[in-house]
Structure formats: structure tokens, C-alpha cells
Amino acid sequence: MIRISEVYKYRGHECVINGVNLVIPQGTQVGLIGPGGAGKSLLMKICAGLVRPDSGSVLIDGTEVVGIGDVEMTSVRSKIGMLFQNYALFDFMTVEENIGFPLRQLGGRTEEEIRDEVNRLLLAVDLPNTQKLFPNELSGGMKKRVTFARAVIANPPILFYDDPTAGLDPVTSGKIFALLEERRERGGTTSIVVSHDILGMRDICDSFVLMDHGRIVFSGTREEIEASTRPFVGQFWRGEADD
Amino acid sequence: MTKHTQAYVAALSPTQRRIAQLGVIFVPIVTQVTEILRVGSLAFYYAFKKPIRWREVVQQSFFIGNRSLAFVMIVLGFLGMILIFQSGFQAKRIVGDLQGMGALYLQLLFREFAPTVTALMLATRVGTGIAAEIGSMVVTEQVDALRMNNAEPIQYLVVPRLLASIVMTFVLSCVALCVAFGTGMFVANTVFEVNVATFYNTSLLEWGDLIIFSLKALAYGITIPIIASQAGLSAFGGSEGVGTATTMAVVNASLAVTILDFVLSGVGYIFFFS
Amino acid sequence: MQALSPFKLLSRFGAAFMEVALDVGGMAVLLYKVIRCFFPPKLDGMETWRNLYKVGVKSAPIVVVTALLTGAIMVIQSGALVAQFDAFGLLGWGAGFATLREVGPIMIGLMFSGRVGANNTAELGTMKVTDQIDALRALAIDPITYLLVPRFIAIVLMMFLLTIVGDLTALVGGAYTGQVLLGVSPSLFASSVIEYIKLEDLFNGLFKAFTFGVAIAVVSSHYGMTTSGGAVGVGRSVNNSVVASAVLIFVLDYFITSILH
Ligand SMILES: Nc1ncnc2c1ncn2[C@@H]1O[C@H](COP(=O)(O)OP(=O)(O)OP(=O)(O)O)[C@@H](O)[C@H]1O
Ligand SMILES: [Mg+2]
């Protein structure tokens, strides 16, 4: 379970995360949506303990992650998988080494097992025979799929997907969403999905949170959001331009 | 500024406020020094903790050597010629005798020029390299990805560079010493007609010179990668951030080398040579 | 490392040589283009003024600190010798001569290259990789006159002026250290400087400073303007720029020293 309470983050005098409260129950998949610059990526990084908020608290399975060091975070971090919006692939490692990295860090597996697991995932994301390539030899969409594979390879119970389908063609994007759905159905994974592809996300999330200017402006299930009478919520959900 | 300091500053008279603003100059210096010390102490903590990525240490040593060997040799070669040129003409004018030049030159190379000029060159070559590498890993979030996988960036990135740099700074300083002495000998021989056997004179060398040489090489070898790593880790923004980090690395590292040189030369003088 | 065949080694050497030749050629063309802008003078007054201010403010503190320490180190290193021969009257000459002619311009040049040269490369490089330079061209603004000429003037002039400041500071640092470490009074130090050091020594050093300034300006602008490849590329350019500047400083110093004798 993830419990975010009263989180504030300033950049200079500007408030970029403005008093966010959110509870994500065990085993649910939450869709985090909102216009560009709303603070979605930043909120995720705060949850992962990568950015320290100016105030507030974030509990992950009962452990406070705000203000503790990387060493104390070890046990929490090994539960979290993260797909970065801007790939964050290690450019000095091959695709194979990148994807296998989390398993290698966890230890307890032979190189053989790691290689098999990597190959299985590469097949699942439709990237066969790319094992020996380096990230700078991949297209944007290919990189996205590699980060996806790296995020999920260790089967972490908590997953943060930051824009997993950006830059992908509709077919591949559908495949990635199908993989997310498959993971959700297996159960036990608590996850946050950030995406601008609301059509693709509609069916795979248990609930939705809409952010704007660092605040949560609406949260609820798909039915609730569709029934909302607030103009901003409806407009954003249906992707209409305001005038 | 916190609200508390804001209120405090508001209550000051204009003159007082102007004086208080002087503090603004020191705040970044103090924060940077603290940050460097933090990275440094963490690096040492992890350097004595397993696991150490020895393969990476070897690879980094190779990088440092491969990247800077030619550079250090060219610079120190020219420096050796310059030094003998200048001191030769001066000695001829004032002292009139060039026989003792080689011995003095060798001593000065040990105490000062070989380790320090090598370090200044490594600060530019290796310092910018480390800052650029780590800096671009920070701005492309690779460092965040490391942290997410419980690979502590300081242990994973800084420690191998630190160990490699300690070894290679010493090795390159020795190479530098030989090259600078060789080119100096060449100029002494061709321009001032000093016999090679006369020039090669170790009579003035003491243990103190060797100790100062090693101490300096060790201190520089530790300081440069730590300062450069700190600069890289503090990068933010895009390509601009990497540029700023690399600039910061050269400046801070060169300045640190100069300060260490001053301190260690003073220590050497007081303990060994006075 | 796998063994290299002689042919491979040769071709690798050739490639490295070609790269250096390309850079040197690029720098020469750049220098020519910048100098051409002075006949007749074509430059942006405001931009030049802004650059002078920026370069001066940015590098003055570090030059002063470096010079102080350099003067002190020169005295420490000659201390043992001076004490051994009881030649306290020569301390000012020894430290002063070395500082004015060699160590001053070299140390200030290296620091200046790190502070200003690296910054210049980083700035131009960032503009290049984010297509800002092409944007200027698209607006019919010549990047050479608008961006490079003001930077050239600022770098060369400030390097020259700061060397004067640095020389003075280094002498002060030397005199003070001489007093603390060897008990040589500042007045003895000063009279030794005045007696033995000729104006020619100062001018020799300042001429070097001027040349180093030109070298730093050309090298840093060249590597900035030829940057490619995003954030990594900017880092690489800065690295190349400071390394090339350092090599040029020592090589130029050698030739100036040997020719002017
Ligand atoms: N470490 C940080 N500290 C302070 N502010 C930050 C930090 N990182 C990002 N920000 C600011 O937070 C704001 C929100 O950025 P964020 O990347 O979270 O937007 P986003 O909702 O993910 O947008 P997009 O949909 O375009 O990805 C921006 O104004 C950004 O400048
Ligand atoms: Mg985002």
C-alpha cells in the first residue's frame, strides 16, 4: 500500500507539488493523468525516494521514505520497479545488460537464468535479436520497450510506469497495455501508470487520479470520472480543447 | 532563504543589509565544500566496503592512462625545456656556473613540478572527463535508475574512479618526472653544453623529496576524482547542466591542486628542508 | 585488449592525425574569420560590454587566489636554496623572475582556460546542440560577429589585464611568505625585485599572456561551435577544449621563450 500525505515541493517560490494526499490500496492499478507539467513525474519520483519533498510523508508498505538515506531505502527499493519517462537506460551497457541489471543487483541467480529471463522478456516486448545493441543504436520506441522490460524483470510488487507508451505506434502501444493488464490480472501488484493515452488506459486501471498544477483535482473510478460534471475533468477525459 | 532569515534581513538597516549581502558570496562556497566533503567521505566509506568492482577499476585505470599519457608527456616535455632554458640563461648571468643545475632541477622536479603539473593536467583531462560522464548520467536519469536498483552511485561510479586515479596519478607523475628530466637534459646539453653525466646528478635528492613527491601524488590522486564526481553528481538540466558541471570540475580541481600544493610544500619545507 | 596488427595501428594513428589536422585547420579558419571582422570593425557593442563584464567578474577571484598561492609556492620552493647560500637578497629576484616570466602567465592561463574557456565552450556547445546557432543564421544574424567577436575581445583583453593583477598579487603573496617562512623583510624582497627585475621580464610575461588569451579564445570557440551529440557531446567538447588549451599554452610558451632569447 502507498500512502501519500500532505506532500509539498517547491521550485524556488513556485509550488510544483501542492499538498497532495493519495492512498493506493494493495493490489490496485491507478492511472495518473493530467496536462504536461502537472507534476506527475515528480510525484512518482517522490514516491520512489528519488526526490525529497519539502514537507509531507510517503509510506510504502508502512515504511516512511521521505528523508531516509539510500542505504535505508534498500529494502523498499527492491520492491519497486520503475519505468522512466526519458528511458534512463545505461548507455555504457548493452540492451541485455540493461534489462538484466535489476536481477544481477538482487543476486542469487546464475548468468544462465538471467539470460533466459531477459530473452523471454525481449520476446514479449517484440524486440528479438537486440541483445547486443547499445541504447544509442535504438529508436525512441525501442528504448521505451527496453525500459519497460528492465522495470518489470524482477517482478517487483510495486511498479511505477511513467508514460510507458509515449512514442510507440498504436500496435506496440496496445501490446504494452496488454502486458500491464496481464500483470494486473495476475494480482498482487500495486502500480501507478502515467500516460497521456487515455483511450488505452481506460480499461486497465482500477481508478484514476487527475492532476493539475501540482494538485489532485479529481480522483475516482472510470464511472465516477465519466459522470463528473466538472468541465475541466470532462474535457480532459475526452480530450477536448477548451475555448 | 527561510522565512526566519527573511524577517531578520528585513529588520536590518540599509548599511547592515549591504554587509549581510556579502554572505551571499560565501554561501555557495560553503555549500560546495560541504558537498565535496560529503562525497569524499562516502567514497572512502565505500572504498573499504565490499563489493568493489575491480574490473571497473582496471578499466578506469586504463582509460585514465590511455587518455592522458600523451597529453601529460607533451606538456611535461615542453615544461622541462622551458624550465632549463630560463634557469640556464639566468644562472649563466648571475652565478656563471651551470654544473649544479641538473641536481637542483631534479630536486625541484621531485618536490614541485612533476607531481603538481601532472595533477593540473589530470584535473583538466580526467576531471572534465569524470564530470562529463557522471553529469550526463545524472541529467539523463541514469543515476536515478542506479539508485532504484540499489546500486549506490557513489559506490558504483565514484569508488572505481577514485581507486584508479590514485594509482594512475602516481604512475603518470613518475612518467612525467622522467620525461621532463629527459627534455631538460636535452636542452642543457644542446643549448648550454652541459655534459649528460654532469647533468644527471642525484646528490641533492633526499628521502624528504621522495616523500613529498609521493604525498603530493597521493593527495592529488584522491582529490581530483572526488571533486570531479561531486561536480558531475550536482548537474541538473540538460546539456547546459553538463557543461556547467564540467566547467565547475576543472576550476574546483585546479584550485584544489594549487591549495594542496601550497599546504604540502609548506609542510615539506618545515619538516624536511629547513 | 586484443593485439593490434601493425596496419591497424598505423591506420588508427592516421585517423588521429587527420582529426588533429582538421581541428587545427578549423581553428585557423575561425581565427581568420574573426580577425576579418575587425577590418572594418563590425561588432555588437552591448554584447561585447556584457561579455567583458561576465568574463572579468567570473575569473577575477580565482585568478587572485591562484596568484597569491603561486607566489607563496615559488618562495617556499626557493626557500631552502636561499637559506643554504644565505642569499636572502636574491629571494625577490628568484621568485619575481619565475613568476613574471613563466609561472604567472602559465598558472593564470590554465585557470583562465578552466574558468572562462571551458565555460565558453559549454555555452556555445549548448547553443549548437539545441540548434540555437542555426536559429541565429535563420534570422540573418552572423554568429561570428554576434557571438564570437565579443567573446574574443573579452577573453583576450581580460586575460591580459588579469595577468597584470595576478603578477602583482603573486609578488605580494611571495613577499608575505618570505617574511613568515624565511624572515626576509618585505622591503628587502621589494628592493631585490626592483634591482634585478627588468621591465622586459614583465613585458615578456604579458606578451605570453596575450598569446595564451588568443589561444584560449580560438580553441574554446572552435570546440564549442563544432559540438554535436547532445549532453554527452557538450561534455566531450569541454574536455577537448581545456586539454587543447593546456597543450597550446605550454607549446606556445616554449616557442616564445626560445625565440625571444
Ligand atoms: N527535482 C525537482 N525539484 C523541483 N521541481 C521539479 C523537480 N523536477 C521537476 N520539477 C518541476 O515540477 C514540475 C512538474 O514536472 P513533471 O515532470 O512532474 O511534469 P509531468 O506532469 O510529468 O509532465 P509531462 O506530462 O510533460 O511529463 C515542472 O515545473 C518541473 O520543472
Ligand atoms: Mg512527466
Image (cartoon, coloured by chain):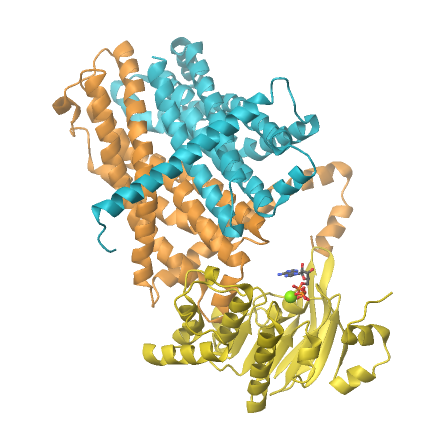
Q: Which residue is depicted at the point 48% across and 42% down?
A: C238
Q: Which hue is chain A drawn in? A: yellow
Q: Which residue is depicted at the point 58% across and 53% down?
A: B238
Asked if residue A69 shows in the view, the reply is no
Which quadrant of the figure has residue B53? bottom left
Report the side of C242 relative to C156 (left or right). left
Residue C57 in percent (x, y) is at: 60, 32
Residue B57 in percent (x, y) is at: 32, 58
Q: Which residue is depicted at the point 26% across and 45% down?
A: C9
Ligand number 1: quarter of image: bottom right
Report the side of A87 relative to A243 (left or right). left
Asked if residue B240 shows in the view, the reply is yes
Q: Which hue is chain C drawn in? A: cyan
Q: Nearer the viewer, residue B222 or C51?
A: C51
Residue A30 in percent (x, y) is at: 66, 81
Which quadrant of the figure has residue C78? top left
